[in-house]
Amino acid sequence: MDSKSRKMVQCDVSDIWHVLGRTWSLVILRNLSTNETIRFNELKRLVSGISSTVLSDRLSELESHGLVIKKIYQEIPVRVEYSLTRQARELEEILGDLGQWANKWKPKQKKES
């Protein structure tokens, strides 16, 4: 891999970690992955300790990066549902692998410490 390609890959990885590394982002994605669609207040109940403002901000960020779909129903009261995009579903597999890797090496790290 040449220097230019390496810098592009590093930038891409840095960009996605900037999004996923934010507090609550992975927890939100995990909870969205267990449901086809979910409403804001349901998600807020599932993610204990998060404020409505932070949840709203994170959902907006995830939506702007193409990981979450926000669907607004013009009803009274307005109903808003969130779901994962196909891109996020692919990421779900990667994060599952990362979780398995972390679990595999966690006991070994404790022994070495």
Image: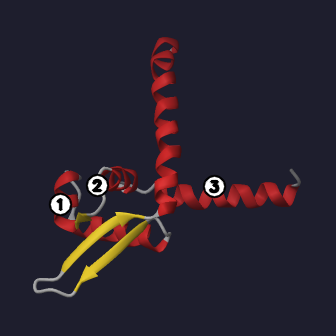
How packed mark 3 is, by other alpha carbons closer than 10 Å (few <14, some 14-19, many 20 or more), is few
- Quarter of the image holding residue 52? bottom left
Q: Which residue is mark 1?
A: 42
Q: Which residue is mark 2?
A: 35
Q: Are marks 2 and 3 in contact (CB under 8 Å)?
A: no
Q: Nearer the viewer, residue 84 or 28?
A: 84
Drawn side of residue 23 relative to residue 76, left or right: right
Q: Nearer the viewer, residue 39 or 55?
A: 39
Helix, strand, or loop for circle 3? helix
Helix, strand, or loop for circle 2? loop
Amino acid found under the numbered disc labelled 3: Val
Front disc: 2 or 3: 2
Tell me: residue 72, above or below residue 23: below
Amino acid found under the numbered disc labelled 1: Glu
Residue positioned 42% across, 71% down in the render: 63
Residue positioned 23% across, 75% down in the render: 80
Front disc: 2 or 1: 2
> From this viewpoint, which residue is outermost toward the left?
76
Residue positioned 86% across, 50% down in the render: 1
C-alpha distance separating marks 2 and 3: 27 Å
Residue positioned 45% across, 17% down in the render: 107
Amino acid found under the numbered disc labelled 2: Asn
Q: Are marks 3 and 1 in contact (CB under 8 Å)?
A: no
How packed mark 1 is, by other alpha carbons closer than 10 Å (few <14, some 14-19, many 20 or more), is few
User: Which is nearer the N-term, disc 3 or disc 1?
Assistant: 3
| Coordinates of residue 49 in the picture (x, y in percent) | 20, 52
C-alpha distance separating marks 3 and 1: 31 Å
How packed mark 2 is, by other alpha carbons closer than 10 Å (few <14, some 14-19, many 20 or more), is few
Can you tell which mark lies on residue 13? 3
